[in-house]
Structures are given as C-alpha cells and as structure tokens.
Amino acid sequence: MDKTRKKELEILALKARMGIIEGVYNAKSGHPGGSLSCVDTLTYIYFNEINVDTKNPKWEGRDRFVLSKGHCAPALYSVLALKGFFPIEELKSLRKVGAMLQGHPDMKGTPGVDMSTGSLGQGISAACGMALSAKLSNKDYKVFAMLGDGEIQEGQVWEATMMAAHYKLDNLVAVVDNNGLQIDGRIDEVMSPNPITDKFAAFGWHVISIDAHNFDEIEAAFNEAKTVTGKPTVIVQKSFKGKGVSYMHDNVAWHGNAPSEEQYHIAMAELNEALEKVQAE
C-alpha cells in the first residue's frame, strides 16, 4: 500500500477508536472490545472499498455492508460518522432513548446502516440474500459482511454459508473477526469453531487469512477477493479484542463494559498519543 494512503487510514482508524471510546463512555454501556478489534477493517472498507453516497444513503446502486456482529455497532457508527453519513457529535448519543444511534444497528434510524442486526447469525443470512438479489436482478453491487468468531457458533451461519456457495455468490465478501474471545471467555473453551479457515473451505468458499491490524494485508485480501469468480470469499482476520487501549487489550472483561471516568481519560490519552505519533511520521 502507498505509504501516504496507509498513514491516512491509520489516522482514520485511530479517530474511529476514539469515537468508540467516546460513545461507550457516554452511554455507560456497550461493547468496546469487539468494536476495537474490527475497526481497522471497517475503516478500510468504508474508505477504500465500498461504493456508497453519503448524501443518498439509500441509493439503489450502492454496495451493501452488514455488521452481523451487531453488538459492535460503536465501530460501525464511528466509521460512518467519519465517512460523513452524520455529524461525529452524534457518537455521544449512543444508546440514549430516542437518539439516532441505538445499541445495535437500526437500518430505519441511522443513515448508512443497510441492515438491522443484533441477533447473532442472522446478519450473514441477510447479506447472502442481498448478494443473491443482486445476481437475480443483474445488478453489479457488492455485499460485505462482518462476523464475530463467537458468532459463527450459531448454526444459521453455516446454513447461510452453504447457500452462498450453492448460488456461487462471488459478489459477497465476508470477514470473520477472529479475536478469540466472547462474552464468557475464550472461544476455544466455550465452544470452539476452529479450524475456521478449513470449515469455510469445506463449504466451498475462497478463504484468505490476514492480520486484522495490518493495512497492507487488509488491502491485499480485498484485492484478491476481486479476482475470485464462482464462489464467495471469506477473510479470516486474526485480531485482538480491545486493540489500541492497553488495559482492554485481549481482555475478555471488555467484551461488554464501559470505562470509568479515569479509564476513559487513560484510553483517550493513549489514543491521542498514538495519533500524534502517526501524524508526525
């Protein structure tokens, strides 16, 4: 990736991380850990990959994105705000009664949200339906979906996965955010979905493995996905829950927990320091 472009994406991802912390802190609830683990790829998708119009969020020809791990809405909201779908000040209204940004994505209430999600396993099914609809109506839009590694314990995920391969949905790219943790502990201990890559390959998908926090690898994966025909693609990304905030890093306690005032200031100071370092390079 071009050095200048990588720097731009790193800056955007750090600002998105700050938006996540801002939102969850003000809400006094939410899911910072899984939001921080997937936000680099979300940033790449919205600033390098997806074809959308912020002034016309319902434009029929747009690419679609489905956050199947809907509890990580703070990451999606932060990236959508940076993209320009709504003012960044809205992030402070997260989870407030009557506000635009609810605890899970709401396609009827939030510009830029293509699918209401939250019940795990259902988002990828909706994404498959969108991709099939594009095929049947000869539309050329693409569909992107983000799943959690704990989420793929849901049986419905594998029904959707089978369907996507059966209908040769090469306009669908799914990303599995493999941070290794879910609400009750490590996924290996709760209900192991491993080996994730082998399972998707067995269901007929093109499989790519990457480091979720390396923009060179993220770009290479999405470029490779464009070359695949006749089958859907899944990008299995190794990530870290709470990435970017020292006390949240790889810590299951931050699956669904809001920082105290002291912890909020620590997180924002760390992210500000990282932002200033990248901007100075």
Image: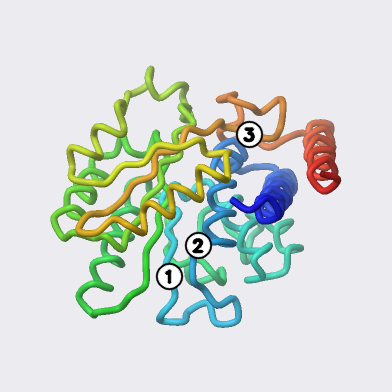
Q: Position of residue 103 (x, y in %)?
A: 56, 52
Report how far apart the C-alphas of labels 1 and 3 lie in the structure: 28 Å
Q: Nearer the viewer, residue 186 or 144?
A: 144
Dot 3 amino acid type: Lys
Q: Position of residue 268 (x, y in %)?
A: 81, 40
Badge 3: few (under 14), some or many (20 or more) residues near its Cα, within 10 Å? Answer: many
Q: Residue at x 36, y 54 (%)?
A: 225
Figure check: 12 above or below 150: below
Pointers 1 and 2 in contact (C-beta within 8 Å):
yes
Q: Nearer the viewer, residue 245 or 201?
A: 201
Q: Which residue is under mark 3?
A: 243
Q: Earlier in the sequence, mark 1 or mark 3?
A: 1
Q: Nearer the viewer, residue 228 or 83?
A: 228
Q: Position of residue 175 (x, y in %)?
A: 41, 47
Q: Which residue is under mark 2?
A: 49
Of the residues tagged 3 and 2, which is closer to the observer?
2
